Image (tube, rainbow, N blue to C red):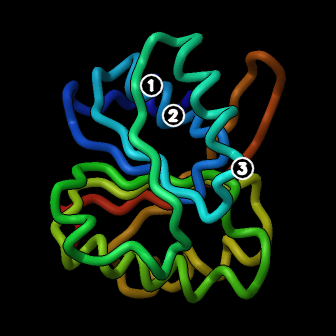
Amino acid sequence: MDYLSNNRPASGLNVMEIGCGWCLTGIFCARSLNATVTGVDIDPEVFPFLDLHAGINRVTVSKRVSGFNGVSINDLKSVDILIGSDICFWDSMVLPLKLIINRALRAGVKLILMADPGREPFGSLCDQFLHRKCADQIDWQTVRPRKIHGRILKIESNNR
């Protein structure tokens, strides 16, 4: 959210948050960027919390129960921005995330942003795209509400 606040994309875009959990970043996009948002998570038990937070923020978020492998190129064709945060915490998640990012690239997604506090599996995911010279890895730090450091994998359509 902090990165998007400081690097604002255009308003009114279609955003998909994968591994969304409570979809807080997606809700931020709906409220601050007037985005149409779809939250995708494999666990339907998170959606009541998503609905609660969306209601508090007076926005609507579409929900979809799916794992990363269940999101197809056709699902991504209408997406402008694909986001995910804190979703690459096991080695076994690197390949499914690499594959969904590749599908997003083939579908024409304009901006892909994946954020992580800096775990090793996320570093491996970043390396997959940095090696191809189609991405940037950004070290990011917030100071409010407290000092937090992390990394962002950023892939823009003009980097392809």
- Residue 2 in the image, given as x and y percentages of width and height: 56, 28
SS for tag 3?
Answer: helix
Q: In whole angstroms, how far apart are the C-alphas of marks 2 and 3?
A: 28 Å
Point out the tag, 2 or 3, that comes first from the N-terminus: 2
Q: In whole angstroms, how far apart are the C-alphas of marks 1 and 2?
A: 5 Å
**Residue for badge 2:** 3
> Viewer-proximal residue, 94 or 56?
56
Corner quadrant of residue 74: bottom left
- Residue 138 in the image, given as x and y percentages of width and height: 54, 53
In the image, farthest residue toward the right = 146
The correct choice, above or below, for 93 with respect to 149 in the image is below
Q: Residue at x 49, y 25 (%)?
A: 28
SS for tag 1?
Answer: helix
**Residue for badge 3:** 45
Given the image, on which type of amino acid does mark 3 rest? Glu
Contact (CB < 8 A) between labels 1 and 2? Answer: yes
Q: Residue at x 23, y 67 (%)?
A: 159
Q: Quadrant of the C terminus?
A: bottom left
Given the image, on which type of amino acid does mark 2 rest? Tyr
Q: Which numbered dot is residue 6?
A: 1
Q: Residue at x 57, y 39 (%)?
A: 23
